[in-house]
Image (cartoon, coloured by chain):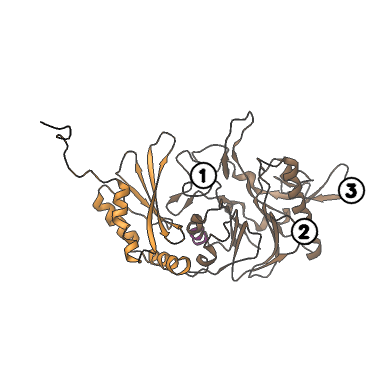
Chain colours: A orange, B brown
Amino acid sequence: MSGLWAGLTLTTPTPSLREMLIGAAGDIDVATGNKLGFFVDTIGVARATKSLRYNCYLRVNRTGYLHLFFQVETPFPGPFPAQVNTPEGDTYLPVNTEEELKDVVAQVIQRPRTNDIVFFLLNAVS
Amino acid sequence: MAAFLLWNVHRRPTLDGLVERLVVQHQIDIVLLVEYATGLSQLPGLLLANGHTHIRQASPDKFGVFVRATHTFRPLRHPLDKRAKLWRWIPPGGQEGLIALVHGYDRRHYSNGTRRLLLRHVHDAIRYQENRLHHKRSVVAGDFNAHPFESAVTSADGLHAMGVRSIRGRGSRRIRGAAGRTDFFYNLMWRLYGQQSAHDAGTATHHWMRNQVHEFGWHMLDQVVIRPGETDRFPENHLQVVTRVGGISLLDAAGRPDVAVGSDHLPVVFHWNL
């Protein structure tokens, strides 16, 4: 007897851009002893959604204080090409794969400015 | 020349980082925030870190006023509502000015007459201080909750700020039924309507649309007005409504303030070469 689940294929679904971002930068909680977290707020742009903005925040877990870290804008449904923007105005080429996204997020994280932000959040806000 | 940032931050401490970036990008000396989240915002620390020397000044709770340490800001005692505050500002050059920060009563709950009365009191307070300090180097900035063309802003029994630099070469005018001449302010904000290319012609600092017969959509609520004598020291081409912070747009796809990332008001940057 074949059940209704017989046709189920257990392939891994393609991760969403949000999951890719969390995969790339979400381990800040481990790096900071769970003092800081990484939070992604996904917003549709325009009434008939044509693109998505992923506002990526560093969050002070104890207080919920949010600091806009960077923003990723993609066409809808996307997820690529994706454009990474920062409040500092750093320029990055559009990314087309998860690997490229990881590379750009790594560049954002490795800026001296990121160190300043994390230091401030850990020392002044936590 | 000192640079000023005026922004209604909608009680959102998440805008701290954007304010700090605006300070860097526009080399801001004086930060004037309306609807500031006192107790939640971390700006007092953030604007003293990473090379910043902007110190928060005593002000009503809903204001966040941060001044570069090389400038002096002295609060002036005057019987005003908590929605307005006056300071004596002394920049490094030594010549002092008067600065008022105002958050007008909101349009939904207060009549034009009530909103006008607050702005009239602000003008009265400035006139008193100008007489006491013997100069007319004054600026009023804030979220007035009134358009530049509404009576609360334009009328002589309101703020008395008009879109003209002078009338027959003078910064005062005669008003029927009133004795003597009455000083007015020059309102520069008229220039900024529709300044964002490719967007609505009436683009301003705040967008709010309901379904009444009479609607504007865009509202130029955030304003800076000056005494006409200061126009030469107030470069109008340096007055701007800001729509980007670095790579982050403060507008949504329709060109309106994006509250998801910013505030429901756009920031205003201006310079005063005192």
Q: Which residue shows up at 30% across the image and 44% down it?
A: A81
Above or below, comparing residue A25 to residue A18 in the picture: below
Q: Please tell me which of labels 1 and 3 falls first in the chain.
A: 3
| Highlighted range, magenta | B20-24
Q: Please tell me which of labels 3 and 2 falls first in the chain.
A: 2
Q: Residues within 10 Å of mark 2 (few under 14, many from 20)?
A: few
**Dot 3: element:** loop
Residue B257: assigned label: 1
Above or below, comparing residue B252 to residue B128 in the picture: above
Residue A9 visible in the snapshot: yes
Give the x, y percent position of residue B40: 53, 59
Which image quadrant: the C terminus of chain B?
bottom right
Pinpoint the chain carrying mark 3: B
Between B34 and B167, which is closer to the camera in this rendering?
B34
Q: In the figure, is residue B70 to the left or right of B22?
A: right
Residue B179: assigned label: 3
Q: Main secondary structure of the magenta part?
A: helix
**Dot 2: element:** loop
Amino acid residing under circle 1? Pro
Q: Which residue shows up at 47% across the image and 68% down it?
A: A124
